[in-house]
Each structure stands twice: as C-alpha cells, then as structure tokens.
Amino acid sequence: MKKRTRRVNKKLVLIILGVLVLGGLAGGYWYYTQYQQKQAAIQQARHEKAQAEVEDIAFKGDRELATAFVEQINQENPQAAGQVYLDQIEATNDTTQKMALYRQYGTFASQYNLHDQALQAALGANELQSSYMTLAEVARVYGLLGDTTKQIEYLKKTIAAVNALPLDEQNKKNMITMYQEIINTAREQS
C-alpha cells in the first residue's frame, strides 16, 4: 500500500509541477504580451507627443510640415528631417520664428550628431541676430567639430559681447571667467 501511495503521490507531484510549469509559462507569456502592448502604447504616445510638439513649436500648427518631419525621423533619416527645418526657415520672414527654428534645428542636429548641420544652424542664428548666446553656440559647435581655432575665435567674440551687456560687474566677471576657462581647456587640448 505504501508503494502505491508513493507512486500516486509522485504522479500527483509531477502533475502539480506540470500544471505549475505550464501555468508559469502561460503567465510569463501573458506578462510578455502585456509588456509588448504597453511598450507599443508608449511608443505611440511618444510619436503623438513629438508630432504635437513639432507642430506647435517649430511649424506653427502646420500639420503637413510637422508630419513630413516626424516621418523622416521615424524612417531614421535625420538629414532629411533637418531639411524640413531648413525649408521652413527659408519660407518664413518672421525673425522671431526664424530664431526659434534655428535654435530647434541646432538642438535637433546636435542630438543626431549632425555637427555640420548644427554649425549651419548656429551660424544662421548668429547672422540673423548676433548675441553672446548665439556666439557661444557657434563656438560650442566648432568645438564639437574639433576646430579649436574657430572655437577660440568665437569664444573671444562671446566675451566681448558679454562685456557689452548691461549687467552688474560680478555677473559679467562670472560669465567671462566661464568662457575663459573653456578657451584655456580648448588650448590645452589642441
């Protein structure tokens, strides 16, 4: 009787283990599919958010241009997406919108390591409305490109622009010190 009970107990244990394993696999599969669905929903939300941001900020509600931009990003063609920015910059006569587009274009190009395009955006913004910020951005991008001579040249122009600002002397001194440190670092690295 004991042997039979052991066999039944072993069979019962094996059945229970089998059920638990199958249940675990089914539960794991269910969790995995839920995870995949959640990831797809997150990706869709990001896409919709990017679409809305691009429409509202860069293209002033122009859905066609925003859609073209986002489609190029989704196709992993950032250079073509950058061209959408350039086309919009050329199409507008509003200086404020052009500056915003140049800034966004520069940020976008830097995110995708398109430093030549980032330089084009920084130079365009500086040409449109030169300030210590646009000069510093040009210097930053020249630094990314490894052109320390141009980087230092634009950092010196940045310092001159900071000196012309109507700020108290302490703020000017802090800003100039910061840019001078960047110049010193660039010289050491070249």
Image (spheres, rainbow, N blue to C red):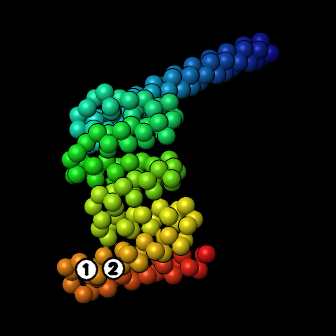
Quarter of the figure that contains the C terminus: bottom right
Pointer 2 residue: 160
Question: What quarter of the picture does the N terminus occupy?
Answer: top right
Residue 145 in the image, given as x and y percentages of width and height: 55, 61
Residue 166 left/right relative to 161: left
Q: Is residue 171 above or below residue 19?
A: below
* Residue lying at 44% horizontally and 67% vertically, measured from the top left: 139
Q: In this view, does 185 lie to the left or right of 1?
A: left
Discs 2, 1 touching: Cβ within 8 Å: yes
Residue at 51 percent of width and 53 percent of height? 116
Which residue is found at the position 32% from the left and 85% from the top?
173
Q: Distance between the residues labelled 2 and 1?
A: 7 Å
What x and y, as percent, mark residue 126? 34, 61
Residue 160 falls in which quadrant of the image?
bottom left
What secondary structure is found at the residue carrying circle 2? Answer: helix
Q: Nearer the viewer, residue 23 or 120?
A: 120
| Label of residue 164 in the image | 1
Q: In this view, does 97 lie above or below 179?
A: above
Q: Where is residue 54 in the image (x, y as percent from the top left)?
A: 31, 38
For the residue carrying disc 2, how many other residues have a C-alpha within 10 Å: few (<14), some (14-19), or many (20+)? few
Q: Which of 30 and 39 is in front in this view?
A: 39
Compared to residue 42, the image places residue 124 above or below, namely below
Quarter residue 179 falls in: bottom left
Residue 108 badge: none
Can you name the residue that lies furthest to the right here? 3
Q: Could you say which is closer to the camera, residue 71 or residue 156? A: 156
Residue at screen point 39% across, 58% down? 122
**What amino acid type should be assigned to the residue bearing mark 1?**
Ala
x%, y% of residue 154?
A: 43, 71
- Total marks placed: 2
Residue 61 visible, this orientation:
yes
